[in-house]
Image (tube, rainbow, N blue to C red):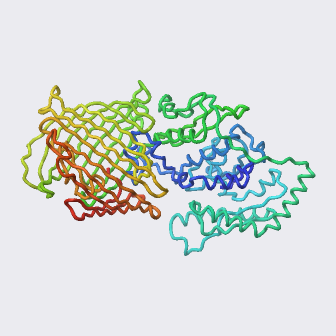
Amino acid sequence: MGAIVGALYAMGYSPEQMESEVRNTDWRQLFEERVDRRHLPMEEKKYDGIFTVSFPVEGTRVALPTGLVSGNHIFNLLARLTWPYHDVDDFLELPRPFLCIATDLELGEQVILDRGFLPDAIRASMSIPSVFEPVWLDGRYLLDGGVLNNMPVLEAFDLGADFVISVNSSSDLRPADELLSLPDILTQTIAIGMRTSMLIQRDRADFSIQPDLSQYSMLSFADVDEIIRAGETAARARIDEIRALADSLNDLRSTRNGSHIPAFQQLESFRVRSVTIDGLKTVPEDHIRSKLQIYSGNTVDDEILTNALMRLYGMQRFDRVTYRLDWNGTYDEADLVILLQEQTANIIQTGIFHNNMTGPSILFNATLRNLIFPASTARLNLRLGYETLVETEYFNYIGIEPRLAFYGSAGYRERELDIYQNSLREAEVKTDMLYAEGLTGPLYASVIRMGIGYRFEHFRLSESIGFLDLRSGWTSLHLLAGELEFDNLDRSDLPTSGGHFLLRADYAPDFLPNETSFGRIYGSWTGHHPVAPRLTLVHTLRGGYSFGNNLPLHYRYYAGGYHSFAGYRKDALAGNNIITAGLGVRYRFYGQFHLAPSFDIGNTYDRIGQSVFDEPLTWGWATALSWNTVLGPIEAILMGSRDNAVLFEFQIGMNF
């Protein structure tokens, strides 16, 4: 990380400005490289957060990453911090001369970076092995310079320094009884290689400062205050030497008539002179520009530019989405160059889900980009366990208009329905369904999706428990379908802000080869509103209406379970029409632990024209304890209702 500090100092950043950047940057988000859900395109949000393991695949082999972090978000932070100096090609021309060190991974030799694009040089110099992916720069594959030279004191003297103070932020080698894992061994191995050159270089400095950082790691994001204090304590221990050195430097400046370097002034915004897209191979440029939404003549600040870049990165089609600014002699306006590196790998992913009311299930997914058409996505889904699913999906932006898209799906799925009578389960019905659906419509601003089209179903009902008068054999349906969806939730698991709205209509008309004509319209809304730093208000609305005769059993409305209607088992509430409402709060009381009391009220009814309020409303309550983990939320729920004193529900992961 020394390259970052050195570059900021060379540009004129004061210690106070550097400290402000450290405190105001969400380092965990930069390292996790998780895209804010609001920046994901609508076609990707359905899959956000449901997979626990992902593998990129190149050809027929699994392409393991070359680092835990690609460094895309880090690079864009560096680009922002260096805005005024994107045009500077010679780092010796910065307010203070600067260079940084990298290691050529192929040749095993030190590389001095003192020219080029400043964010590129910093990013290459901080490519810690196994943590950050190496960087290709000027035909060389570069790693962190610390591998060969973690304290470039001699290089600082060669740059013209009269005095050099070295600061060693690395820790001593750890004893053998603390090396308990593969990461421990790898870190120690790297440290051994760095130690010899560091000791040699340290002795060449005028004096050295070594803070005690043994209890911290590069992931100690929450310990910024303690780490800063450790550095200050180590420096104050040698304050007399530092003051003497400062006096010597002041005397030297007066002798040389040196000029004072003004504090760095960050630019707040700039006017876009032009926008250039560089690096595209398969994705159409007009599609990129429709996502970027920055045009010539726009005034852009850091927030606008960051959101635009995240919309591109959220498309899941690029390994790298970065930029550079060409000022051409003025800081009022700049040419914006978007630098893209397209993904070449497909993805295999796996997710798990378990609920004590339904049982476990596992989802396997293969995602293929640019299949048949550029900017398309094909998916193969296989769900085993509860409600088996075999499905293919295809999504493609239609070239007529960048925001117009086609979505198609086809496959086989099971649906298991529990049939209740007077709060007692009297039957279990299995629906086997072959289906195909195609919808076409526009998408807007990563939050709205619309589509109209056609759906075909070929299904049969079979009874595994109970005695119902079910029609035997297979039945076909031809339906006209339409959807409208809005989604600006901040995250898929335990959201803290935003909302999700879905409106779906299906109609089996007489003029298509249907045995019976029916239709239904369904709408649902869930809103999340932060009312305090750890407290979120959650409210839900759900309504469904159907018409026609002989509504198929799987087209009725069902409710029950914590995430559907608290206090009832799955499918315990059923009818041809439904209306429910819910209200609750979720409080994050410790770390990633949440407590969420909630209350649901509503009713189902069968007869057309029957008022939902003609019968007593059904109600239910729940209290959920949730823990957000890498597997998704783990939730334990106590709930009850008008018909059930107490029920217990437990689930692991995101439901798919």
**Quick check: 585 above or below 179?**
above
Residue beneath the point at 65% across and 51% down: 125
Q: Position of residue 534 (x, y in %)?
A: 47, 58
Q: Position of residue 394 (x, y in %)?
A: 34, 36
Q: Is residue 630 above or below residue 547?
A: below
In the image, 551: left or right of 382? left
Residue reaching furthest to the bottom: 177
User: In the image, what residue occupies the spot 27% across and 45% down?
Assistant: 390
The quarter in which the N terminus is drawn is: bottom right
Relative to the observer, which residue lies in front, 64 or 420?
A: 420
Image height of 192 relative to 445, above or below: below
Residue sticking out furthest to the top = 400
Q: Residue furthest right?
A: 255
Residue 225 relative to residue 489: left or right: right
Where is residue 492 shown, x and y percent of the image?
A: 40, 50
The number of callouts visible is 0
Residue at point 30%, 31% (across, down): 452
On the image, the x and y values in percent for residue 166 come to 75, 61
Q: Nearer the viewer, residue 150 or 286?
A: 286
Depth check: 264 or 312 in front?
264
- Give the image quarter of residue 448: top left
417 left or right, relative to 30? left
Residue at x-position 21% and y-position 52%: 617
Q: Relative to residue 419, is residue 436 depicted above or below?
A: above
Tell me: 270 left or right of 438. right
